[in-house]
Image (cartoon, rainbow, N blue to C red):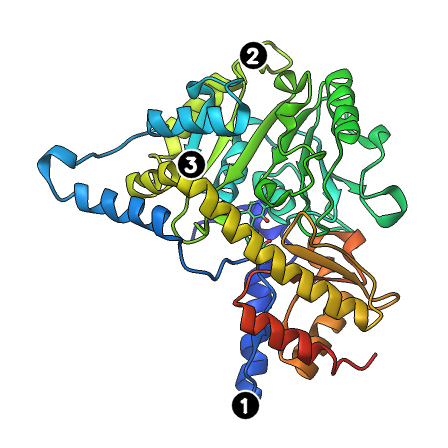
Amino acid sequence: MISRNPCISNLKAGYLFPEIAKRRRAFAETHPEANIISLGVGNTTEPLLPHISRGLAEAARKLGAAEGYSGYSDEGLLALRERIAETFYKGHFSADEIFISDGAKCDIGRLQLLFGAKTKIAVQDPSYPVYVDGSVLTGAAGPWSGTGYQGIIYLPCTAENGYFPDMDLIPEHGLVYFCSPNNPTGAVATWKQLTALVKTSVEKGALIVFDAAYSEYIRDDQLPKSIFEIEGAKTCAIEVNSFSKSAGFTGVRLGWTAVPKRLAYAGGESIHADWARVCGTIFNGASNIAQAGGLAALEPEGLQEMRQLSDFYLGNAQLIRSALQKLGISCVGGDNSPYIWAKFPGRDSWEVFAEILEQCWVVTTPGAGFGPAGQSFIRFSAFGHRSDVEEACKRLEKLTR
Ligand code: PGU
C-alpha cells in the first residue's frame, strides 16, 4: 500500500478542537443528565442579522434566473475586492491586491505553500494552533520534542512581557505568524509594538503573516486594526482576515488575504504573483452567495449589524470575565476580543479543562493547546447565547480549587 506522508506522522495529536469535542462526547456518554454548555471553540451562535441575511438570500435567488446566474469567480468579485480595499485599507490597496477566500484558516493553510519546508517559522506563544500544525504538515516543523515542535521558534507572549515578544527572537529570513487581537490571550498589539515588529522584520528580511480575524472586536481606537496601518508593512507583511467572527460567517465561509504587489522574496520574485498562481491552481474561489453576503456586510446597514453582533459577544465576554474575577481567578482579554484568558497557577490546563467540564458541565479550551506558554491557562470563548453564558457563569461558582 502507499506510504503515509511522514509530515502527518510528525503531528503530536489530533487537532485541538476535535480533541476537545471528543472529550466532551466521552463525558456526555457517561453523564447523560449533563446539560453541557460550550465556551470552547470560537464558533458563532447568533443568527445572521437581517440586512446581511437578505444579501445572501437575494444572491441565491438570482442564481435561479439566466440573467443573474454566475459560475466560477476565481480571485473574487471585483466589487467585493474594491469594497474591502476601501473599508479596511482606506484605499491604500488596489482591488487586485485583495484575494477573496473561503476563510482565514483556509488561506493560512494555502499560504504555507509559498515558502517551503526549509523556512524558519516563528509564532507567538500562545497562538492559534493552525500556524504550527500547518507548518508541520508542510514539513517546515516537527517532530514534537517534548516541549514544542522542532523548527518552530516560540515567541513567549506573557503577562511579564506585556504579551509582546522579544524582537531579538525574530528569525532572519523567516516567517512570523502574528495575530492581533491575539487568540487566545485577547491581547492587542499597540502602534508602537507593531512598529517594532515591522522594523525588525524589514531589518531581518522576515515576512509577517498578520492574522486580523478579530480586528472588528477592537473598541479602543488607539489600537491598530491592521498591520498595514504601520509604515513599511507593505514590504514585509501579508494580512489574512475573515467575515467569520464579525458577520457570523463561520458556516457561510468568507475571508480575504491582502498581498501587496511590491512584496518580494529574497531573490526579488513577486510574492503577489505566486499567491495568484497558488490560488489559481488549488482554489476555485469563494461561494458567489457568500461574496454577496460579504458585500451586504460592507454596506452601511451591514457595517452597523457587524458592530451590533460583535458588541453582543463582547457583552458576553464582560459577563465571563467578571464571573471569573469574582471567584478570584485572574484573567485578561475580553475588552477588544471575544476570548478571556484565565490563569490557574501551577495547574495542568487539560486537568483544569476536565475539572470545569465535570464540575460545571462547561466546555472550555485548555491553554496548552495554544503552545507551551499556555500551560496553566484556560481560554473561555464569548461566543454563545446570552442565556447559556449566564448559566455557565453561575455554574462556574461550583468550581472548587
Ligand atoms: N484565525 C484565527 C486567529 C482564529 O482564531 C480562527 C478561528 C480563524 C482564523 C478561522 O477563521 P475562518 O475565517 O473561519 O477560517 N478560531 C476558532 C475556531 C477553531 C478553528 O479551528 O478554526 C477558535 O476557537 O480558535
Looking at the image, residue 343 sits to the left or right of residue 208; the answer is right
Q: Assess whether mark 1 and mark 2 are in contact (beta carbons under 8 angstroms).
A: no
Quadrant in which residue 73 is drawn: top left
Q: Label 2, label 1: how many angstroms apart (C-alpha)?
A: 59 Å
Q: Disc 2 or 3, which lies upstream in sequence?
A: 2
Disc marking residue 319: none
Name the mark nearer the viewer: 3 or 1: 3
- Taking the spot 70% from the left edge, 49% from the top edge, the residue there is 186
Instruction: Note whether 23 is above or below 308 in the view shown.
Output: below
Name the mark nearer the viewer: 2 or 3: 3
Quadrant in which residue 287 is drawn: top left
Q: Which residue is mark 3?
A: 298
Disc marking residue 262: 2
Give, as a three-letter code, the residue at label 1: Glu
Secondary structure at badge 1 equals loop
Q: Disc 2 or 1, which lies upstream in sequence?
A: 1
Q: Position of residue 253 (x, y in %)?
A: 41, 46
Q: Which residue is mark 1?
A: 33
Q: Is residue 381 visible?
A: no
Label 3: few (<14), some (14–19) or many (≥20) C-alpha neighbours in 10 Å = many
Looking at the image, residue 102 sits to the left or right of residue 71; the answer is right
Instruction: Note whether 288 is above or below 1 in the view shown.
Output: above
- Taking the spot 59% from the left edge, 45% from the top edge, the residue there is 7
Q: Label 3, label 1: how many angstroms apart (C-alpha)?
A: 44 Å
Secondary structure at badge 3 equals loop
Q: Nearer the viewer, residue 291 or 204?
A: 291
Looking at the image, residue 333 sits to the left or right of residue 87; the answer is right
- Taking the spot 80% from the left edge, 67% from the top edge, the residue there is 325
Q: Nearer the viewer, residue 174 or 375?
A: 375
Give, as a three-letter code, the residue at label 3: Leu
Q: Nearer the viewer, residue 83 or 205?
A: 83
Q: Assess whether mark 3 and mark 2 are in contact (beta carbons under 8 angstroms).
A: no
